[in-house]
Amino acid sequence: MTINLRAIAFCLSACFFFMQFSPASGQEAAVSDQNDAFNFDALKVVELDNGLSITVIEDSGFQKNALALNWNYISGLEGSLSGLKSAHMRCLLRKLEETLPQFAPLDWDSLEVSGSDDFIGLVSPAENIESIIDWLADGVTSFNCDSTNLSVVQSEMQSELQGTGSSNGHDSMNPLMNHILFSENHPYGEMQSPESIAAIQSNAINNLHQQLFRPNNCRIVICLESANDFSHEGARAAFANWKTRSVPVSNLTRPGLNSANDVAWIASDATAPLRFQLGHVMRLKPADEDAWVLKMLADIIQNRIQSLSAAESLVLVDFEADKHMGRFMVYGIDIPEARMKTTLESTQEILQLITKDLPTEDEINAAQERLIERHVAHLVDASYVAKMEASLPGSEWIQSKQHARSKLESISSNDVRRVANNLLRPKNLNIIGQGPRALGIEIGTAMDGDGDVEWYTANGTLIEPYLPAPGLTASSVFEAFYESCGGTSAFEALKSSRTTMRMDAEGGTVFTVETTSLYGTGFVASFEANGQVMMENVVTLKEGFKRQMGVIQTMSASEYDRLKPDIYLARFLHLEDLNGAAKVLGTFETNGTIQNVVRIHFGDQAVETLFFDAKSSRLVESTVERTGAAGKNKTTYGFESYQTYDGLTFPSIITQTTNGRTIQLIAERIELEVRINADIFKRN
């Protein structure tokens, strides 16, 4: 696989700080603060009656004309149709290519047309702007996906997915990093699959187009060396029949931060380039007042890392954000194998240092000049200017050289340290690397919080250490487990129980926990210390709450979702009620035993992986992973010393480990079919 370093560098330096600055009001507006490095001779913004915004930027410094057409939307989690937005754009571009000869005396290649999920970019000669607008208007407003084009698009996407792990024009590492940062339950973290692409039908593409690609959700920007041949009235007429429609508002939650470093590794042979990505999600806001400080901070970090790296290496650093959320990212490309571990460790040290110590004045001044130089280079790039203005009307990143200099010169060393301290998380990083497996193990041992490296193929597929188990189903594994412990029907028939357990943490008894359960109705877990009940968790099918020293307190939704499954004694047989879906991953051999592995995805975004001894059918371990406001959380439970009580068998020792902290629950008494007063489930 070859990597275009120049293209990557451009993409990073053009990072999408999608901070929302107010667009020019009225029919026309002019850009002030002009200078000889970049001069908007004219910027005209026209708002059509249907809500479509058309901006024309004229500057004699542009070498070519460029057009950007952007829809700002997040359609939400596509799930089984992951890849729908990409398929839609590909079909739209194919339709535009077919109809081009009817509107403009140009060929497709001369236009340099490109597209992403919600963006069309176009570079063209100076003439025929009116014809190009007519062509775009006709193609966008009359678009209808047909089965022939969709079939071709699906074949293209499948081929790319098989080769690189992505059909979005990226290699596998980019979507994989988003998948790890945001999870598969978030639109940003979706991973395409052959199955999801094959499931896309033309009606889904047409529905997406009709629902979201509307004039009131669209912005067109045209950058011209000379605007003599362009008429706003002609553009008005071209799009006059495009009707406005209400567009759903995107509402995306931000995933939490890690509690420690996590390493994922793409094992490759010696011919593949050695590289890495490192980063974390940030809580950037639209119109962030520290936008230029972030730029300078990224440049200083990049310069520090690059100065420690080998000459042939390339390290790029940037803050990337849209109106919903942001990321801090470090990209390492062509890192020598002998320096990969050192580079990652040095990067973490640099991030920790810059949150505490002030950068020097020399670093500040050098960063200013580098940033201004890059800024000016962007301003004469018509494609860059068009795309940024379409995405961010009034963006900071296409203001004048004087504007950039004034912003940068106002930044102090204290500003850089303050922003670094507020936003960087040097001990809570996601790291993806590519290289030999032995190198991945070495880096995982050094950098990962729990040393548990996740392994991926070159096309981004998770490699799990499980062998196929033909014919094995999740339901059969669950049935065998309950049968081995006294019989499925006996578990389902049990109405109530009372369990007393001792909770040991780091060798000392902390609590005695008594759980009173009326199965199918609810349970109360009482935590006692020194003979006094300190707190009770009360969970029913309808709600969860706490009683602490007689005071009623609210139970969080995430805690309720975590505790609710214990309402059922045979909880694996009630997954439909618990909004869970299970599948067999295969078998796993460890310590001379074979285990059947089942994974459950719950509606609250929790994922539980269960390990059952294939010989005894008993549950020996489970791992539960959750992503919430507090970050990613992974808890492992070990089940041992099964004992039988009145014909039913339960583990008498449960060892719980969360982020390196271990708690052991030891059963002291288990009573079945006890009399329970249902009033204990009521608020009082």
Image: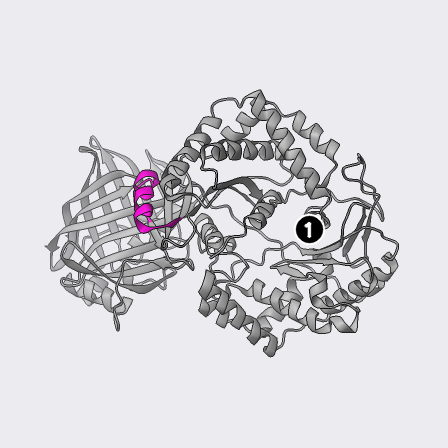
The answer to whether residue 436 is magenta is yes
- Dot 1: what SS? helix
Looking at the rendered image, the quarter that the C terminus falls into is: top left
190 vs 143, left or right, is left
Left or right side of 648 for 403? right
Residue at point 56%, 25% (across, down): 363
The colour style of the image is one colour
Q: Is residue 306 magenta?
A: no
Q: Amino acid at mark 1?
A: Lys
Question: Height in image: 492 above or below 298?
Answer: below
Using the image as rendered, state which of residue 356 and residue 344 is in the foreground: 344
Per the rendered image, the range of residues in magenta is 434-453
User: Looking at the image, which is closer to me, 288 or 350?
Assistant: 350
Give the residue displayed 76% in from the left and 67% down from the top.
106
Q: Which residue is mark 1?
A: 387
Q: Whole-percent x and y of residue 478?
A: 24, 64
Going by the image, does 175 lie left or right of 380?
left
Visible in this render: residue 133? yes
> Residue 236: horizontal and vertical position, in percent?
84, 60
- Location of residue 557 with respect to 481 vertically, above or below: above
Q: How many marks?
A: 1
Residue 633 position in % (x across, y down): 36, 44
List x then y, in percent, for residue 488.
20, 66
> Few, some or many C-alpha atoms within 10 Å of disc 1 (few <14, some 14-19, many ≥20)?
many
> Quick one: 585 or 156, which is closer to the camera?
156
Q: Nearer the viewer, residue 375 or 424?
A: 375
